[in-house]
Amino acid sequence: MPELPEVQTTVNDLNRKIKGLTITGIWTDWPKYLKKGFEKEVTGRKIEKIWRIGKNIIFDLSGGKIMLIHQKMTGHLLIGHWQIKNNQPISTEKGLLAEKVNDYIHAIFWLSDRPSFAKATEGKMMGFSDLRKFGKILVTDKRDFDNLKGLKDIGPDPLTPKFGFNEFKRLISKKRGPIKKILMDQDVVSGIGNIYSDEILFVAKIHPLKKAEKLGDKELRAIFEAAKKILKKAIKLRGTSASDYRDTAGRAGRYTEVRLVYQREGEKCPNKCGGVIKRLKINGRSAHFCSHCQKL
Ligand SMILES: [Zn+2]
């Protein structure tokens, strides 16, 4: 699933590529994405700004509406051109957008700098490639936005400057259980998932099964610092594409190449401690770690 660095990369791309354009129409072959009346609510509205809350991509639309897209497991947003033939979108561009991983387009937003054009098919398009079709798309009035289910209780963003160590400590101390699970809990801090919890705990030298309630100040601070460092580095490298995630041009993120432990089971520990990266399951998710460097 795309995490904070991947979602931030997408948001940066979208602001650069489609901010100021108007949604002129929508196509989908997966009606479950869109509630009744969705198309009518967003069509004709200008995209004023794109930002994010945790892993949710938020589109501020003109006239007091907000559109939210959550990419879930395999979703990613692409900016390109497609033609619909027999209800199948075909990329009219060669290269990355035509690659298999980017070819599960199940929704398209037509965009135009000329709002009067109905479905201006010559304009830019935002395609939603979503192999598993778990993605979420919804629209709401701005005044109802803060009460949206799933957003109301979301934890602070680990990269906001005002998010300090004391707040981090306070949030963690409310929880019990393996620290990896707590780090991935979106109600504690937002945006961290399976990839970056592994990376953060490796840098902090904390075993993923270590109980959150057993962590001292020094250990908590190591996790807090590692989170900021790793997430910033991953944004710089435009995210991780160990699975389906691609940026809006269909390009893979380069953190994949420098990742320390995530999906590196059996490889040598990057600390050169002589150990080998191991994998174990925590709540059905894989944790990758070095048992020499990361103490329980
Ligand atoms: Zn090691």
Image (cartoon, rainbow, N blue to C red):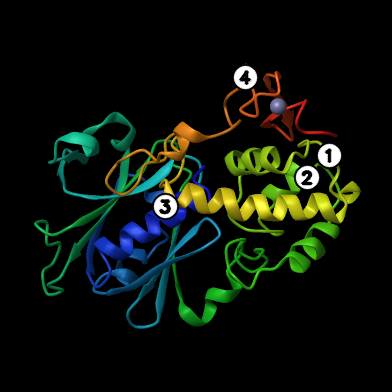
Q: CA distance from mark 3 to mark 1?
A: 39 Å
Residue tagged by mark 3? 33
Image marks 1 and 2: residues in contact by CB distance under 8 Å: yes
Q: Nearer the viewer, mark 1 or mark 4?
A: 4
Residue 211 vertical placement versus 17 (above, below):
above
Residue tagged by mark 2? 179
Q: Earlier in the sequence, mark 1 or mark 2?
A: 2
Q: CA distance from mark 2 to mark 3?
A: 33 Å
Q: Earlier in the sequence, mark 1 or mark 4?
A: 1
| Secondary element at image label 1 | loop
Q: Earlier in the sequence, mark 4 or mark 2?
A: 2
Whether the residue carrying mark 4 lies under 8 Å from ligand 1 is answered with no
Q: Residue at x 79, y 53 (%)?
A: 220
How many neighbours does mark 3 have within 10 angstroms: few (below 14), some (14-19), or many (20 or more)? Answer: some
Q: Nearer the viewer, mark 4 or mark 2?
A: 4
- Picture coordinates of residue 198, whole percent (x, y): 65, 38
Say the numbered circle drawn on residue 268. Answer: 4
How many dots with numbers? 4
Q: Nearer the viewer, mark 3 or mark 4?
A: 4
How many neighbours does mark 1 have within 10 angstroms: few (below 14), some (14-19), or many (20 or more)? Answer: some
Q: Residue at x 45, y 36 (%)?
A: 132
- Give the amino acid type for the residue marked by disc 4 in the picture: Lys
Q: CA distance from mark 1 to mark 2?
A: 6 Å
Image marks 4 and 2: residues in contact by CB distance under 8 Å: no
Left or right: where 146 falls relative to 235: right
Q: Residue at x 80, y 57 (%)?
A: 172
- Picture coordinates of residue 24, whole percent (x, y): 20, 66
Q: Earlier in the sequence, mark 3 or mark 4?
A: 3
- Give the amino acid type for the residue marked by disc 3 in the picture: Tyr
